[in-house]
Image (cartoon, rainbow, N blue to C red):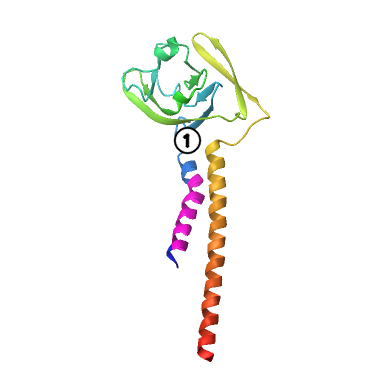
Amino acid sequence: MDFELKWLVWLGSFFICSPIFVKGLSTEDLQNCPAVQYGTIGNSAIIQCDVRKSSAQFYWFDDSSNDNPIIRYENGTTSGRGYDSEEYNLTSDGSLVINEVNFIENRNYTIKALDESFELVEMETITFIVGTMTPSRNVSMTTRDDMTTVTSMPDGDGGLPIWVIIIIIVAALVVVCLIVAVIIKVVRKKDKESRQKMAGSA
């Protein structure tokens, strides 16, 4: 196989398989914490992670600090710098609520859950990806006793994330290039055979 064709095959395999690899990162753990989650600029969003069943207290961190949580839940009370600034809140199951998504939220979030003996029982790191397309579901929130109750409502203007569209377009282009490369290779082979036959008859 020609070098150009090998390169196209490798490139095509990479982009075609990329969605599979990305999807593999989104497996849910025991406490329902998908490793990759998404939000849309200007909307509220929930970074889902059910921690209430296995912990007495828990803490949410972002990339900016590993020792100063953006929000914490201790002794039935919600607090923290992100909660005080009204940028973040919690759902009834301990999931993190971003009240208004901005590009700065495009980062990793880590949740640490402790039991009554202050022993670490769970730690999960979640990648939050920010997009600009209208989400397929909106979030309605009401606050009561320092907690946020979240209701999801259908939205007819949903769309695929930008990265999915880019992968689909690139994969389609790669497939077209592969087809063209195969056709060129077949034509060259036939041309070469034809020349050999003409040379042999001469």
**Image position of 49 with respect to 171: above or below:** above
Q: Which quadrant is the N terminus positioned in?
A: bottom left
The rendered magenta stretch, by its main secondary structure, is classed as helix
Image coordinates of residue 185 in percent, x first then y, are 52, 69
Q: Is residue 13 magenta?
A: yes
Q: Which residue is mark 1?
A: 28
Magenta residues, as a range?
Answer: 4-20
In the rendered image, the residue lying farthest to the top is 145
User: In terms of depth relative to the viewer, which is nearer, 56 or 138?
Assistant: 138
Pointer 1 local density, CA inside 10 Å: few below 14, some 14–19, many at least 20? few
Where residue 197 sits: x, y (%)? 53, 86
Q: Nearer the viewer, residue 190 or 37?
A: 190
**Residue 16 in view of the camera:** yes
Q: Residue furthest bottom?
A: 202
Residue name at image x 42 percent, y 24 percent: 54
Q: Is residue 34 left or right of residue 172?
A: left
Q: Name the residue rendered at 57%, 46% in the picture.
A: 169
